[in-house]
Image (cartoon, coloured by chain):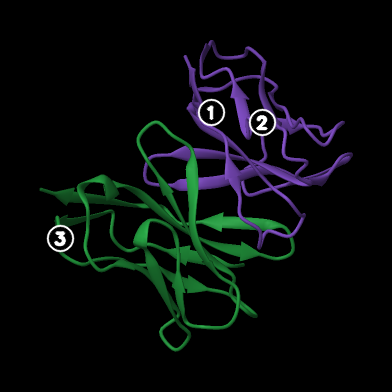
Amino acid sequence: NAGVTQTPKFQVLKTGQSMTLQCAQDMNHEYMSWYRQDPGMGLRLIHYSVGAGITDQGEVPNGYNVSRSTTEDFPLRLLSAAPSQTSVYFCASSFRQTTTDTQYFGPGTRLTVL
Amino acid sequence: AQSVAQPEDQVNVAEGNPLTVKCTYSVSGNPYLFWYVQYPNRGLQFLLKYITGDNLVKGSYGFEAEFNKSQTSFHLKKPSALVSDSALYFCAVRDPPDKLIFGTGTRLQVFP
């Protein structure tokens, strides 16, 4: 199993550009989520999904969209990038929709918005 | 809302000495608590969790954590630190029904 994969590893955007961060898992996990990691602030939940076709907002959802058309994929879309979205983004998944299960994290995408 | 606090940005310890990384929590209802570790340029890895039962939880790489309800704490411990334990450690708490809330992280530095 590849586990949780994220692409790209690095990305530089200009303010106002849009892009999609890709996340995929091959473990047949129901639950998937996106976090951003910023110095001194730890990990903050952006959006999450408890199954295909179901998504919900986390702590910091503004400026981001998600969809979950398949169990395997959970892309994160930046609609109009802003410098405040410069961060490291992590995707995570777990087997069941309850968050008592172990979360498996991808390697991260480092995004810089100029 | 559920929350966790990690009061130390960094913990320094000599190799071979015991280590403690602190975490306190604030929850309504039963706490579900976790520790994760992040090595440089990597994603987070699960270490251990407390759901119910024994207050001393054993996890990966020789780590353990003690759940203390009266002090609302869930400190991570290891009897003998290794240089390879140097990493960023995160405490997390379940925010029902479907969210996991992380602390700000503590950097552990183990010196030879």
Up-down relation of residue B110 to residue A18 (above or below):
below
The amino acid at mark 2 is Gly
Q: Residues within 10 Å of mark 1 (few under 14, many from 20)?
A: some
Palette colour of chain A = purple
Residue A38 image position (x, y, % from top left): 44, 38
Give the CA separation, mark 2 to mark 1.
8 Å
Say which residue label 2 marks: A63
Say which residue label 1 marks: A85
Query: Tag 2's secondary structure?
Result: loop
Q: On the rendered structure, is A15 left or right of A41?
A: right
User: Closer to the observer: label 1 or label 3?
Assistant: 3
Q: Going 38% across and 53% down the picture, which residue do you hit?
A: B89
Q: Residues within 10 Å of mark 3 (few under 14, many from 20)?
A: some
Q: Residues within 10 Å of mark 2 (few under 14, many from 20)?
A: few
Q: Residue B80 has which mark? A: none
Give the CA separation, mark 2 to mark 3.
46 Å
Q: On the rendered structure, is A114 left or right of B79?
A: right
Up-down relation of residue B58 to residue B91 (above or below):
below
Q: Chain of mark 1?
A: A
Query: Tag 3's secondary structure?
Result: loop
Say which residue label 3 marks: B16
Q: Are marks 1 and 3 in contact (CB under 8 Å)?
A: no
The amino acid at mark 3 is Gly
> Which of the 4 image quarters holds residue B32?
bottom right
Give the CA separation, mark 1 to mark 3.
41 Å
Q: Quadrant of the N terminus of chain B?
A: bottom right
> Which of the 4 image quarters holds residue A14?
top right
